[in-house]
């Protein structure tokens, strides 16, 4: 079959890989001139196979008044109300029960554990260099209440073969000495030894090149998809600004922009953009090697080769990017106050970045066939698209039949 993959983010290129494994002819289309120019470009880099906790939770619900009042610097909610945001927010609030949180977290965990296995196979097959390491991950918990919740969640996850365990802050300092230099107080941590880290941009770029060289795959950058033409409930054509294509099927991997193409077809995805930011700085001898997530400041610290990537924040500002400079500055200040010795903040060589996480209300991605024959979805990966890329691409590719 000839299959067109819409979007050359990490989800698109990984989907193309698994489609090509099955012998399909693949065309990847992206409006940008570069691979992974959207949310995949500067993300936290964490292959977070154990920390799959859905965003909607009773704990977040209890913090909502503080967030809505603008008192939590990790969140920024723009007061402009639009129907898409209202619709998403109501569905999100409905997911904030203990039961939904548990079910969503478990469903994502199962995907993530399969993704880890698939990533190992893909790495061994291709030999890419993307600063991959089995770094392990520490999630630092601020309060006793957070520790109790973490104990429950870890017990649940361990039933599914996940190695996450609750440890004391002293143990965390032994595992990663950089924790001893953090300025916040912590009640303890969750440690998952098998979690990994890697540069999504380097991975995606190399995979796109590899597919063009080794497989029947064409990558068409600088090509904007305008619409999908449907006749009698079936995909008829893909219209782009460079002309029209008539593939046997498409896979929509457009991240936070997926709705724009799918809404006119009546495919309701309820994806809302949640903007986040990162800065990448040179490392120091005091930098971390184990990935650290500080739940107090909603910030992650990942070591990628000679650099430290600091990422975080959750902004609901529609598709606007006008506050990026301010938000990146706040991220940098927060990180420096929390972890003054973790990276070289004096460097002139600090890369700043922002991206839209494609959030679904339940944090679960949308995978598989849509209601229109020939139109398949692989989108809505929210905070975990890098982690879930392999399993999503693999499972969606397997589900496409002639
Ligand atoms: C601050 C931050 C930190 C994060 N940290 C992590 C992390 O540590 N671990 C993790 O697992 N995940 C993380 N994520 C989430 C992860 O980055 C995303 O889930 C993932 O990148 C989504 O990939 P994607 O391919 O679906 O979307 P994107 O990378 O956004 O790709 C979509 C592509 O579609 C293209 N496109 C859109 N519309 C059109 C059109 N009409 N025509 C042609 N092309 C189009 C865009 O140009 C873009 O290249 C983070 C995200 C952010 C923002």
Image (cartoon, grey):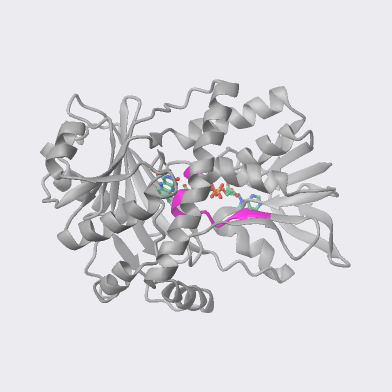
Left or right of residue 80, residue 264 in this image? right
- Asked if residue 292 is positioned above or below residue 84 in the image, the reply reads above
Query: Please, which residue is most extreme toward the right here?
Result: 232
Residue 285 lies left or right of residue 138; in this view the side is left
Where is residue 257, by image quadrant? bottom right
Tell me, yes or no, if residue 8 can be seen here.
yes
Place residue 56 in its image quadrant.
bottom left
In the image, is residue 72 part of the stretch drawn in magenta?
no
* In the image, residue 383 lies in the stretch drawn in magenta: yes
Question: Which residues fall within the magenta stretch?
Answer: 377-387
Name the residue: 67% across, 48% down.
396
In the rendered image, residue 220, in percent from the top left (x then y), is placed at 71, 39
Name the residue: 41% across, 57% down. Answer: 275
- Residue 256 picture location, percent across and down: 54, 58
**Residue in the picture at 53% in, 41% down:** 115
Considering only vertical position in the picture, is 239 above or below 103?
above
Q: Position of residue 379 (x, y in %)?
A: 59, 54
Position of the N terminus by quadrant: top right
Q: Position of residue 129 (x, y in %)?
A: 48, 22
Nearer-the-camera pick, 391 or 320? 391
Task: Say whether residue 19 is left or right of residue 69.
Answer: right
Of all residues, the one furthest to the front in this rendering is 159
Q: Is residue 38 visible?
A: no
Figure label count: 0
Residue located 31% across and 63% down the image: 75
């Amino acid at each position: 079959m000839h299959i067109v993959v819409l979007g050359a983010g990490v989800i698109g290129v990984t989907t193309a890989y698994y489609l090509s494994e099955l012998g399909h002819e693949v065309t990847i289309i992206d409006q940008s001139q570069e691979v992974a120019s959207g949310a995949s470009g500067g993300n936290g880099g964490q292959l977070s196979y154990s920390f799959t906790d859905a965003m909607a939770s009773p704990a977040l619900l209890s913090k909502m008044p503080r967030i809505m009042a603008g008192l939590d610097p990790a969140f920024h909610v723009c007061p402009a109300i639009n129907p898409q945001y209202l619709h998403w927010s109501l569905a999100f609030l409905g997911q904030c029960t203990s039961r939904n949180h548990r079910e969503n977290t478990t469903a994502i965990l199962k995907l993530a554990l399969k993704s880890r296995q698939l990533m190992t196979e893909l790495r061994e097959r291709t030999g890419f260099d993307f600063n991959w390491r089995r770094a392990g991950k520490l999630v630092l918990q601020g309060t006793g209440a957070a520790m109790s919740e973490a104990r429950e969640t870890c017990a649940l996850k361990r039933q599914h073969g996940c190695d996450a365990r609750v440890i004391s802050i002293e143990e965390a300092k032994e595992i990663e000495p950089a924790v001893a230099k953090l300025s916040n107080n912590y009640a303890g941590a969750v440690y998952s030894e098998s979690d990994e880290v890697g540069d999504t941009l380097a991975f995606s770029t190399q995979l796109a090149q590899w597919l063009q060289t080794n497989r029947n795959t064409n990558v068409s950058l600088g090509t904007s998809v305008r619409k999908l033409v449907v006749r009698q409930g079936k995909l008829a054509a893909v219209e782009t600004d460079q002309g029209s294509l008539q593939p046997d099927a498409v896979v929509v991997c457009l991240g936070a922009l997926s709705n724009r193409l799918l809404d006119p077809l009546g495919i309701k995805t309820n994806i809302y953009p949640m903007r986040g930011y990162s800065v990448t700085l040179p490392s120091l001898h005091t930098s971390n090697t184990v990935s650290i997530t500080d739940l107090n400041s909603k910030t992650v610290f990942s070591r990628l080769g000679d650099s430290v990537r600091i990422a975080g924040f959750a902004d609901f500002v529609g598709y606007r990017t006008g506050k990026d400079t301010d938000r990146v500055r706040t991220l940098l200040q927060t990180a420096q106050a929390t972890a003054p010795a973790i990276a070289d903040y004096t460097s002139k060589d600090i890369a700043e970045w922002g991206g839209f996480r494609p959030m679904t209300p339940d944090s679960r991605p949308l995978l598989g066939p849509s209601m229109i024959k020939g139109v398949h979805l692989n989108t809505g990966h929210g905070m975990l698209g890098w982690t879930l890329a392999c399993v999503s691409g693999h499972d969606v590719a397997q589900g496409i039949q002639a």
